[in-house]
Image: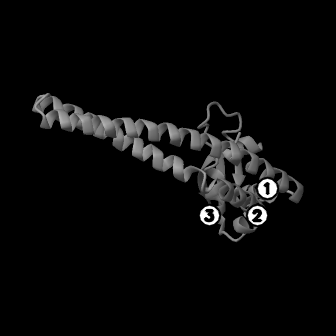
Amino acid sequence: MTKKAVLYARVSSVEQGKYIYYHCTGGKGKCLQKSQYIRQEELEKQFDEAVRKISVSDNHKDWIIDALKLSLADEKAYNEERINSLEVQAKKLRDRIEKLYIGKLDDKITEDFWLEKDTQWNKELSTIRTILEAHEKAGMNYLKEGIKILELCNKAYSLYSNENAECKLTFGLTQNIT
């Protein structure tokens, strides 16, 4: 069974209450190895080999962190630009809502028109506030998360090897790697 077929395996069966075998379900289309079975131990060995290969060298890690830092600067500039634009939009809406209310107080607009526009503009203002919050939080974890992912890559095998066989296979069988 090829690695590609192994990664699509989803079905297990117990033979004589002793061994567990897996085979490809053909879930990704026609599979030439659908009728071939592989023992759980062999499948575990293949997953073990694959996970063992996950790592990032110190040189690559340093290069990726430098690239993340450069990218972070671009991300910050974009977020600042977007935040400024959203703040301008929010100020326009607040000014409109204030003028709308004054128009209502001075009987220049009807109650229905005031209610319609006030509701519409307050919804738009709420949406802008939500987007603003997202942009303000966006850059905070960018670099930290990137470094955590790199560290996780280097710890992947030790984390994986500490799991029981069922967890290991569940991990491997749920991956859609081609």
- Going from N to C along the chain, the mark reached first, 2 or 1, is 1
Could you say where residue 34 lies in the image, as x and y percent from the top left?
66, 39
Could you say where residue 108 lies in the image, as x and y percent from the top left?
13, 28
Q: Circle 2 is placed at which residue position?
A: 157
Q: Circle 3 is placed at which residue position?
A: 166
The image shows a total of numbered marks equal to 3
Q: Which mark is residue 155?
A: none
Could you say where residue 75 lies in the image, as x and y percent from the top left?
65, 44
- Of all residues, the one furthest to the right in this rendering is 59
Would you say residue 1 is visible in this rendering? Answer: no
Question: Along the line of sight, which residue is nearer the eye, 39 or 122?
Answer: 122
Nearer to us: label 2 or label 3: 2
Mark 3 closeness class: few <14, some 14–19, many ≥20 residues within 10 Å: few
Q: In percent of the image, x 70 and y 57: which residue is there?
A: 149
Q: CA distance from mark 2 to mark 3?
A: 16 Å
Mark 2 closeness class: few <14, some 14–19, many ≥20 residues within 10 Å: some
Q: Which mark is residue 54?
A: 1
Mark 1 closeness class: few <14, some 14–19, many ≥20 residues within 10 Å: few
